Amino acid sequence: MNDNDLKKLYFLKAIGYNFVGKKDLKSTSCYCFDSFDKLNNQIINCNLCCLKNYSVKSYTGFGNINSKITFVMLEPNLNTNIMDNFLELLRKYLKFSERDFYISYLLHCKKQMSLDLSDCFFKCRPYLDEEMNFIKPKIIVALGEDVFLNLYIQNAKNSSFESLRGSFLKFGNAFLMATYSLDKITKNPSLQANFINDLNKIKDVL
């Protein structure tokens, strides 16, 4: 049994599933939810990690679940100015409207800087995997180094974020591309040109 199998079993147990025999386990799907609505309902009512104690609510992703591209943020960004600027960049440089993409999160609650988030990443990651199983995007864009390193764990160990940023990497049945987080380019406007250049590469793959 590999690490991914163990993570799946821990996740199933945490959300209330009972373990079954080996024969039954092999005959069932490795995904937990039979509808997107049930998945979102579980996210909204999740209390698997300590972030639930600090967050007002859990946030589901938003956008078109039939789109070919999914942007993954570290956490829900409640700053409307930052989100509006991002959506404007997508409209201006990719000619995207909100029906052309989906946005989700590695953590579905707002993070707390004082906490060790490793357990939160471990427990929340399966929700993103479930979303990607339903959406089946062609491209997944990791917005920020933390997102990228948590998605591409094994293969990113010997490479720096900057060396892989803007590259399309095989990621299951999709391509994964890393670029800067929205907070990063807001605090460092000089990085916006590189960010836009990364976005423009998406058009060549879609």
Image (cartoon, rainbow, N blue to C red):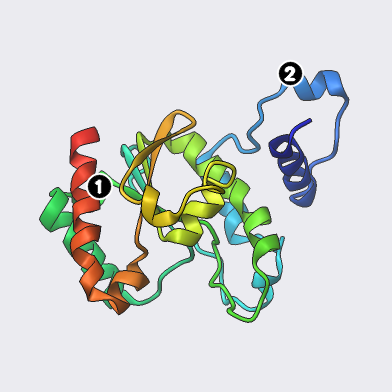
> Which residue is at 78% across, 48% downward?
16
What label sits on residue 31 in the rendered view? none
Q: Is residue 196 left or right of residue 154?
A: left
> Which residue is at 30% across, 47% downward?
101
Mark 2 is surrounded, within 10 Å at the Cα level, by few (under 14), some (14 to 19) or many (20 or more) other residues, namely: few
- Above or below, 137 relative to 164: above
Q: Amino acid at mark 1?
A: Arg
Give x and y (percent) for residue 20: 86, 30
> Which residue is at 81% across, 21% downward?
24
**Residue projecting furthest to the bottom:** 114
- Above or below, 50 relative to 125: below
What label sits on residue 99 in the rendered view? 1
Q: Is residue 117 left or right of residue 147?
A: right
Residue 178 visible here:
no
Q: Secondary structure at mark 1?
A: helix
**Residue projecting furthest to the front:** 158
Give x and y (percent) for residue 169: 40, 37
Q: Nearer the viewer, residue 52 or 170?
A: 170
Q: Is residue 202 left or right of residue 15?
A: left
Quarter of the figure that contains the C terminus: top left
Circle 2 residue: 27
Give x and y (percent) for residue 119: 70, 61
Q: Nearer the viewer, residue 177 or 133?
A: 177
Q: Nearer the viewer, residue 140 or 36?
A: 140
Residue 126 visible here:
yes
Quarter of the figure that contains the N terminus: top right
